[in-house]
Amino acid sequence: MSRTLDELTALVAEVSDTYASRNDIARDDDWYLLKVQEELGELVAEYLRATARGRLKGDDAAMVRQKLEDETADVLAMLMLFARNNQVDLEAALERKWFQYLGRSPTV
């Protein structure tokens, strides 16, 4: 099943809203960027483990891979929330910043 970036962002926001409500977390402007940084650190730790430069902590290769994928998802989700909170249109920014080098508009 494919979803648009806006659909994914809405789902991520719903999960984040539920999590914040259940755990009494106050999310201000700084929180979104700090969470991106926190999740990026966790991704780096899993990458180090996946590339044999970190302790496995009893995990096998499949579990390390799953954790790497999960932390990658966390980084993306928090970046999407950061963009939403700061009114950044990611699709427009990608068009302007990245896709200009294609010399054409990408097909979706």
Image (tube, grey):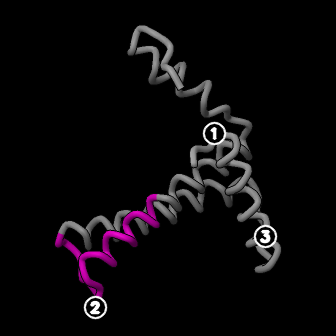
Residue 24 or residue 17, whichever sits in front: 17
Going from N to C along the chain, the mark reached first, 1 or 2, is: 1
Residue at the spot of label 2: 58
64 is higher (above) or lower (below) than 89: below
The alpha-carbon separation of the residues under discs 1 and 3 comes to 21 Å
Residue at the spot of label 1: 4
In what quadrant of the picture does the C terminus appear? top right
- Image location of residue 76, percent across then percent down: 53, 52
Going from N to C along the chain, the mark reached first, 3 or 2, is: 3
In the image: residue 106, left or right of residue 67:
right
Residue at the spot of label 3: 18
Give the magenta part as a residue range.
Answer: 52-72
Picture disc at residue 80: none
| Residue 50 image-quadrant placement | bottom left
> Residue visible at 61% across and 34% down?
90
The mark tally for this picture is 3
- Helix, strand or loop at label 1? It is loop
- Image location of residue 87, percent across then percent down: 74, 37
